[in-house]
Amino acid sequence: MGCFSFSFSFFFMCCVFLPSFTFSASVSTHTISPDFTASNFEFINTSGAFLRSQNGTFKATIRCQSTLLKYYFSIVQSATKIIIWSANHDRPMSSSDKLSLTVNGLTVTNQTGQTLWSTPQFNSDISALQLSETGNLVLVDAGNNTLWESFDHPTDTIVMGQRIPIGKSLQSAVTDEDMSVGDYRLEVTDRDVVLQWNKMNYWEMSMDPKAVRNCNKAVSLMVMNGTGLYLLASDNSTVVQVALNGSASFRSGKLGFDGRFSIVRSWIDEWEEEFLGPFEDCDLPLYCKEIGLCTLGGICSCLPEFSYQTNGDCMPVNRSLSLPSACTAARNGSQLNSSISYLKFGPGMDYFANNFREPVKNNVTLSVCQDLCSQSCSCLGFFHEISSGSCYLLENHLGSFIWTGQSTDRLGYIKVLVGSSHGNSFGSNINQKQNSSVAGLVLLPLTGFLILIVFVIIAILWLRKKRLSKTKTVKLGQSNSLLSADLEMISIPGLPRRFDYEELAAATENFKNKIGHGGFGTVYKGTLTDQTIVAVKKITSSGVQGKKEFYSEISIIGNIRHVNLVRLTGFCAQGKQRFLVLEYMNRGSLDSTLFGDGPVLQWGERVEIALGTARGLAYLHSECEQRIIHCDVKPENILLHDNLHVKISDFGISKLTSREKSTFFTTMRGTQGYLAPEWLTSSAISNKVDVYSYGL
């Protein structure tokens, strides 16, 4: 049952059985005086709002998050419904828990009177609680002096006009529904703004492509206004700036539960995402979970010597090995007494935090670096750079690793513990030998009879040998062929995740949920075991033949990453079955939006869709390592996501050509009505055919 329906039922019962019940204060005011109490239940008819800013831009509410029945005292931007601040994020309320304003401060209590959250003690009495047009919640005394303000205690969001000084930080929530403090922080330092996971940096504002460093003065604070995000020195000069897309009626920056910092703006009753850092999936600490390996395009796999478990985690292939547990004093002693080993992964693989920290030691040998890790239970792995002798320790927590594709002399090692099963198996073998001796004495009289039976069986099998030899040879050849194909796949770098047919059948409910059909096959909606929603395209075109050719094309398509191109997350090649696993676009195709029964696209929306499509095609034609001609540009292959974010689908499947030259196709490709004249005149096919189709 959702929060609203639960609260409404409760409210209805109280209205029937308690007709004399009255509220303790009125709503729609921007100032409240003591003594005042509020609960979500009391103000259900106003969505929990009991305080609004002068022009109604912001409101104070006791708000429920989805179906978890958790309520939070929050400040919300009225138009976008974005929560810009919350008080009791670690101790949620129920619908009838109280927020109280007295002369001593603000307090959130539960039904038993236990304090869930409160403001500190003040030297003077509170006269009023005010909500400003900037979204700042302020407590003032009789002289209108500010005693406390929410802007001084940020949660996961910064808004225009809010100043975050050094030493302050934004902290992520656990999920969109659970507002408890998560593992990610955006910290303002005297040099920069950094994103941290478990005290490890993984992004710096000044290193972002959109950022400009103007000087090397010490940073004093971070502020956001109508033109951008700025780091200012104590004299208000700009140290680092990120220019944004012009003016906005409302702009907020939020540290999401996934570890990304995003900035959105509201304009003309709409909102758009202006900034995202880090932009690349592989730069996120846990994008591929612990000991996952992230390749270009956000494709996840496991490190060498590790494999996926049923729960999606990566564990050592050798089951006698285990990963160290959390570091404690007791565990430290047992780990040092255990047999420690290391699993190595070669050049081209790096750790997300290595470029943001200094090595613990320089000019040391591999053995010294390994000893440093072995002597500390907090160390879970290390990197050693041969040329410089630099030693990097991976301590306390392990995140995702990155496939850089660059051959370096920096090698990584993951610490593992040799399981106690070795000692147990030795004792078990002794017992087995003793039992075998006793069994031999008991079974000795039966030996002759057993030999006779074995002889008869061998004779029968020999008579059938010639008849079965041919069949066995054929099966062996088929097996070798399959093995060879798998080896070819392994030898092709950059392949995305490979799915089994059974996985995709389960995800799509045996391919029942059909959401589209194109020239290359049918598309189904699916839900993976980790609840990720995907689009599964079954390739029915005969253009893709052998596995090797299919793998080669997939490795290229899987490594293409652009904001206006649908991302390939995986594939399946099992027998003659060919599937592509793509990111799901919840708004469907441009075709259905243009010609469906939904709202008519506004002029500004159409321009943005056209520009996004053009950017995607330009990337395919001139910025990819291998030029890609789409060959079937049409509204059905232009997909839309939230806020009409446009992405091109079906690229790269038809034909790949080199950067230097165009290629003749042996058969006509595309859709009637969008075909360029070159198809009809036997002229050379180039990227101009896509431009022609785009213009139509």
Image (cartoon, rainbow, N blue to C red):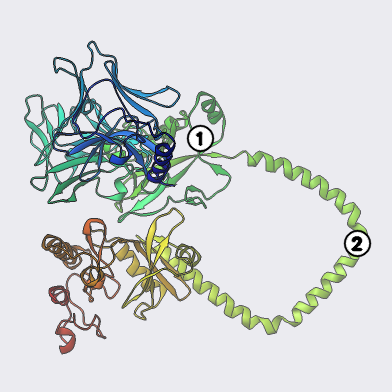
Residue 54 appears in the picture as rendered: yes
Q: Specify the farthest residue to the right.
A: 445
- Residue at image mark 2: 446
Label 2 Cα neighbours within 10 Å, binned few <14 / some 14-19 / many ≥20: few
Label number found at residue 603: none
Residue nearest the viewer, comparing 399 with 51: 51
Q: What is the three-letter code of the residue carrying label 2? A: Leu
Q: Is residue 588 above or below residue 85?
A: below
Question: Which residue is painted at 28% across and 75% down in the image?
Answer: 654
- Of marks 1 and 2, the one in the foreground: 1
Report the side of 395 relative to 658 (left or right): right
Q: Secondary structure at mark 1?
A: loop
Q: Which mark is on residue 325?
A: 1
In the image, 332 versus 441, the foreground residue is 332
Residue that sits furthest to the bottom in the current view: 681
What x and y, as percent, mark residue 361?
A: 33, 30
Please tell me how crowded label 1 is: few (under 14), some (14-19), or many (20+) other residues with Cα within 10 Å: some
Q: Position of residue 339 (x, y in %)?
A: 56, 35
